[in-house]
Amino acid sequence: MKPVVFGILLAVVALAADSDAARFQQDLQARHLPFGAVLDPIFALPDSDEIIGYTRCGDSAIWTGHLLAAQSYRWSATRSPEALDGVRNALEAIRKLIDVTGNDTLARCAFPADWQFAAGIVSEEEHHGVHKGVINGESWLWIGNTSRDQYLGVFFGLTAAWNMVDDASVRGGVGWLAKRMLDNLIGHGWTVVMPGGSVSTTFLHRIDQQLALLKLGSRVGSRSLSNAYGSAAFFGSASTALPIGLEVSESLEPYFKFNLDYLSLYCLLSAPDSGWNRDNYRRAFGILRDRTADHDNAFFNMIARVAMGPDPARDTRTAELLDQFLQRPRRDFYVDRTGAYESCSENRACAPMSVIDRVTTDFLWQRSPFQLTGGGSGRIESAGIDYLLPYWMLRALQ
């Protein structure tokens, strides 16, 4: 397909789909951001609009980072004041997740202590540890045991905001938040330390993820972080393919590991670097892409667009996948495709299933496209970031 024709095609698709994106955005704003960060509502019944609680608090940070990325690409595509407000609101939500801990550690989730749905969240997340904090003079609770997933999601969003939003206040906020978290991580030897001194996770064995975080730090005007990145990349960039290679050689499960790998490599490949570093990062990306390119994953395809440049066949397919996404249920109805697809092992199709038929979940692109069964009772609504993020990336980069 000729580039001009392809560009016209995507422009027509974009105009037709903007109304769908607006609908997702409206629902997100109305029901999924009670305090700025992403949470998913629980409804009284599958066909009810009465919210009786909230859930998925333990992954609020990672999806708020994805939301920040979606709003940043939306701003780049539309330059709308609403998109810029969305970027600023997501940055403010991330600020709260850092402020509430009192020492620049990132919380998984945070909410006012007197919130009517606080007890349900506490019960669901108590295994992660529930801690007290203060935001703007008010008593809040926050969820600990913060994982590398949460940091990678937030830094992905911050990196996308730095890349796509040419606004001084946004860039100032990105730099301030990134430096706070990095100073804390480096000060604790790349471990995440909870109140009482317990370690919830470490980045020590993942040089690729350290570099992903440090690269943003090197871009925001901090000389110390720039020096730290330069040294770490000189000695470590050649090793970034090792953990990626290990993960792709193993089972597809847990599939979310691939989402984290794509986040890291986005951070590393979405900005200029030395030829040595970039060649090493592209080698790692090639290993990851060889394993996942045929998975019909719209989000992974768009990160490939950033890392490798345009590809009319891939990008057209991404638009088709997003059109399929619109035919999926928003709530977590149980799905069983056993018998509908050829099975190669228990709960595993032999080939990627149609996006329409895949299991219901929080963020579709971190779930295996081969999974035949899964879901819940139909009472939890997903935030729709799994549509908005690849959609706005496609629009901004066409």
Image (cartoon, rainbow, N blue to C red):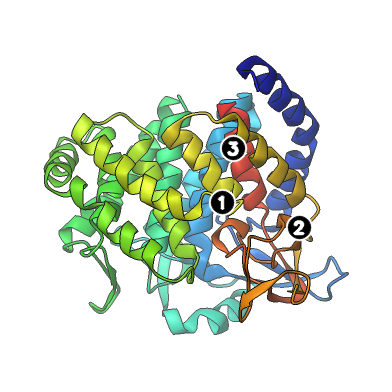
Q: Residue at x 28, y 33 (%)?
A: 219
Mark 1, residue position: 294
The amino acid type of the residue labelled 2 equals: Ile
Amino acid at dot 1: Asp
Q: Residues within 10 Å of mark 2 (few under 14, many from 20)?
A: some
Residue beneath the point at 64% across and 25% down: 78
**173 or 328, which lies in front?**
328
Q: Residue at x 14, y 44 (%)?
A: 228
Q: Nearer the viewer, residue 105 or 161?
A: 161
Query: What is the distance, in whole Å, between disc 2 and disc 3 at their CAs?
Result: 19 Å
Mark earlier in primary sequence (1, 2): 1
Q: Quadrant of residue 320?
A: top right
On the image, the x and y values in percent for residue 350 come to 62, 67
Q: The N terminus appears in which quarter of the rendering?
A: top right
Task: Report the amino acid beneath label 3.
Answer: Arg
Residue at 26%, 79% in the rendered image:
196
Cβ atoms at labels 3 and 1 below 8 Å apart? no
Give the labeled residue for mark 2: 356
**Can you say whether 87 is above or below 369 in the image?**
above
378 relative position to 184: left or right: right
